[in-house]
Image (cartoon, rainbow, N blue to C red):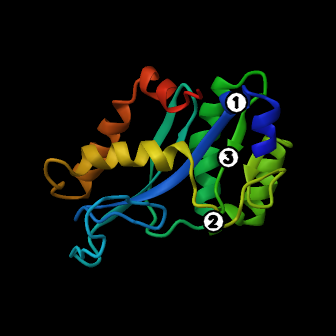
Amino acid sequence: MFHRIQDDENFLDSVIFSDESTFHVSGKVNTHNCRIWGSENSRVSLEHVRDSPKVNVFCALSTERVYGPFFFMERTITGSVYLDMLQEFLIPQLDEDDQEGRIHFQQDGAPPHYLGEVHEYLNARFPGRWIGRAAPIAWPPRSPDLTPLEFFLWGFVKDRVFVPSLPANVVELRARITASVAEMTPEMLRSVWLRD
């Protein structure tokens, strides 16, 4: 992918980045892909409610639009659940926006994305134009997921969902997530992609 970007400075304009995130009513944040830099002592511990109600949410992001949020009703996202979401939610929206077949679809190496049926579907839908683990355009299997969703979208949404107060329940949590994604403007998205 790095070489594609070097060879074509407009390549990123055709990429749809995607990711899932978990939001807990308690405000707990999954730090698997989160890097926090600070000047204070990093050995601070925070207490969180164990097994707090949560939602798993999917979004995709282009230079012009946010696709989502999509809330998984299942507690665990399996390959079959992920494939259903692609077929029923995301791909119909992409088809509306991509009449010329230019879009490149990116997904990380999460286990549900690696299901053979998901790969077969993406090979048929985006022949030679999808980015991921064992995909036509390689995405590193253990990458730190430095995508616009990780360094911009999820932080933006979590700041609005959990500040100034925590949601009272899952219904309010979903409503806050939906409202914060709706706040995204074309200008905000363009600034995420500025390359100087």
Disc count in the image? 3
Residue assigned mark 3: 106
**Circle nearer the N terminus (1, 3):** 1
Q: Is residue 176 left or right of residue 88?
A: left
Residue assigned mark 1: 14
Residue 66 at x, y percent in the picture: 49, 34
What's the residue type where badge 1 is placed? Ser
Quarter of image, res 116: bottom right
Residue assigned mark 2: 112
What's the residue type where badge 3 is placed? Gln
Few, some or many C-alpha atoms within 10 Å of disc 2 (few <14, some 14-19, many ≥20)? some
Task: Identify the secondary structure beneath mark 1.
Answer: helix
Residue 48 at x, y percent in the picture: 23, 74
Of residue 174 and residue 45, the one placed in the foreground of this image is: 45
Q: Residue at coordinates 14% horizontally, 47% vertically from top-left?
A: 164
Task: Identify the secondary structure beneath mark 2.
Answer: helix
What's the residue type where badge 2 is placed? Pro
- Front label number (1 vs 2): 1
Few, some or many C-alpha atoms within 10 Å of disc 1 (few <14, some 14-19, many ≥20)? some
Q: Vertical placement of 151 versus 61: above or below? A: below
Q: Is residue 45 left or right of residue 101?
A: left
Quarter of the image with the N terminus in it: top right
